[in-house]
Each structure stands twice: as C-alpha cells, then as structure tokens.
Image: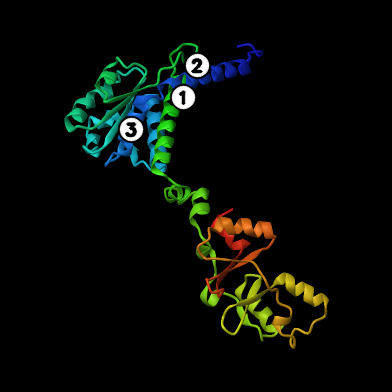
Amino acid sequence: MSKSFDYRKVGLRVLETEIAALRGLQEYINDEFNRACDLMLRCTGKVIVMGMGKSGHIARKMAASFASTGTAAFFVHPGEASHGDLGMISPQDVVIAISNSGESSEILAVLPVLKRWGNPLICMTSNSASTMGNEADIHLCIRVPEEACPLGLAPTASTTATLVMGDALAVALLEARGFTSEDFAMSHPGGALGRKLLLRNSDLMHSGDLLPAVSRQASIRDALLEVSAKGLGMTTILNPDGTLAGLFTDGDLRRILDQRVDIHQTRIESVMKTGCTTVPAEMLAAEAVQLMQTKKINGLVVVDKSNRPIGAFNMHDVLKAGVV
C-alpha cells in the first residue's frame, strides 16, 4: 500500500455515509415507532432484545440502555434460546428481534414458540416484506441507502442506524415514564454519576461523638484541643440551648495568633466566626461541594431545622467518597 494513502478521505466518506443513513432514518420514526413505544411502556414483564452477530452486539447495548433508563430489559442470544434459554422469557415479555435482512435463521427458529406464548413481537429489519417483517406485530424499519463498507458487506451504516433507533426508543420511554436523574442514579450506584446523585450530606458527615463542639464559654485552648481531637480542621460553638452560635477553624487560629491573643484566658465566643454557612442533612453532597467551591470554604456544618449542629464534614470527606 502506498505511504500516501489518504486515510482521512476514507474516514470522512464513512462519516458522510453514516450521517446520510441517519437522516434517512427520520422517516421511520412514524406510527409504528409510536406503537412500539406504547407497547413497551405498557409491558408488565420485561423487554427481551435479541440479535445475531453484529446485530447481537447492538441488541446487547439496546438492552443495557433500556435497563438503565427505567425499562426493565435484558439480552437473550437467539442461538442459545433454541437450547434452553427460551426459558428466560415469560409470556408477559415484549420481544425485540433485530436482523438487517429479516431472515436470521436463529431468530426464525424461535419465533414459533414466541408466537405460541403470545409474546408481542417487535422486529427491526431493513425489509418489511422479510419473514421477520411479516411475523412482527410491529415492524421498525432500519433500512439505509448503503453501507459505509465499500464492499457493501460489513455491517456499518446499518448497525449505526439500528443503534440510533434503539436510543430513540429508550429516550422516548424515559421521558414518557417521567424518569429522573435520581432514578438513573439508582441503577448506577457504583459510578461517579451515581455517587453525585445519591450521596447526601448525611452520608458524609461526622456526627455524634465525632462532631467537634464546644460551648461559648470554652477557652480558645479548649476549642483548639477539640479541633485537633476531631480532625476536621474546625469546631462548632454552641449556645446553651444547643443551637449553633458560631464556628472556629484552623484559619481562624492563624489570624488570632498574629494578634497575640491569650488562648488560655480568652473565651472562644470572642473570636468565633458567626453567620457561617450551614447545610441540611438531606441536601445532595454534590450541591454541598458546589456551595463550598462558591464560598471558598473547606468544610460545612450540617444543622437540623432548629439550627442545632448534627454533623460536619470537609473537602477530604468529599474526595474520599468520590463525589468529585
């Protein structure tokens, strides 16, 4: 092969071919698409997605997208289905079968059983007159003008179109269900997004005996010992009724040392910071982080509705929890 071969030219041609395929897909977002979404929305079982070869890879991704956006779904390999895996499917399930030609022998082999069970069948093919197209209760066309492969053999534009059709179904169902970011987080508890959407201040805060607190009458020395013992770089200052009077931090210590204050005789109330930023326990930790960044502070006090401190945390706790 010549060293001057223009890879970029080929790459751009592939993109143009696939973009054209997606534009053509718009005409297939039609009444059949509406019927398919409505059928899946009303499904009392699960959505089963199946396909062979490259279509199988797309089917797996579609099932994963459905499952993570509120539509219970999983992938069944049509080849394995004929050897026992059909037992994974119940009569309440909706089946989506994918085959560009509509003549996948592995899928055709299981259609009679699905028909006998009465499973609603959505077929995604490029040919409504194919066997699968004729057997389908709902047919979603994924026809493309041409494949990006110059031989017209390797599935390229057609698999892209199938993937996008699957995304269109998933997102349409997501919006129809009123699926929220918190719902999404519930199915992604292990990821960074899940931590941001699930963790609340109550999950991060140090509470009970771990909450640094001294009374207004305490000396600066006593406050410093509390800061050191609890390791949060701060301590809350409490009124006699247990409400928050103020806050004292490591930064405040540096400032008073410059003023040569007697830490043994001076009460903490005379140097404490009042009007400090507080947060409720139920606030998302991600919101608290944003507040800390805006206020340029390293820690927060969590208070109840009566302004009584119930916890505290700092940026180290946030980083340790993986919120940022």
Q: Is residue 281 above or below residue 85?
A: below
Please state if 24 lies on the left or on the right of 249 as rendered.
left
**Identity, as a three-letter code, of the amino acid under mark 3:** Val
The image position of residue 107, as x and y in percent, is 27, 25
The image position of residue 192, as x and y in percent, is 52, 49
Q: Residue 224 is drawn in which quadrant?
A: bottom right
Circle 3 crowding by C-alpha within 10 Å: few under 14, some 14–19, many from 20: many
Q: Earlier in the sequence, mark 3 or mark 2?
A: 3
Q: Earlier in the sequence, mark 1 or mark 2?
A: 2
Residue 49's disc number: 3
Q: Residue furthest bottom?
A: 265
Residue at 54 percent of width and 18 percent of height: 14
The image position of residue 246, as x and y in percent, is 66, 75
**Identity, as a three-letter code, of the amino acid under mark 2:** Ala
Q: Is residue 47 visible?
A: yes
Q: Are marks 3 and 1 in contact (CB under 8 Å)?
A: no
Circle 3 SS class:
strand
Circle 1 SS class:
helix
Residue 322's disc number: none
Q: Which residue is denoted by mark 2 in the rendering?
A: 148
Please state if 214 lies on the left or on the right of 84 as rendered.
right
Q: Is residue 293 above or below residue 69?
A: below
Instruction: Give the Cα separation between the discs numbered 1 and 2.
Output: 10 Å
The image position of residue 199, as x and y in percent, is 50, 58
Q: Is residue 200 above or below residue 4?
A: below
Q: Which residue is denoted by mark 1 in the rendering?
A: 160
**Identity, as a three-letter code, of the amino acid under mark 1:** Thr
Instruction: Give the Cα separation between the discs numbered 3 and 2.
Output: 25 Å
Please state if 78 lies on the left or on the right of 237 as rendered.
left
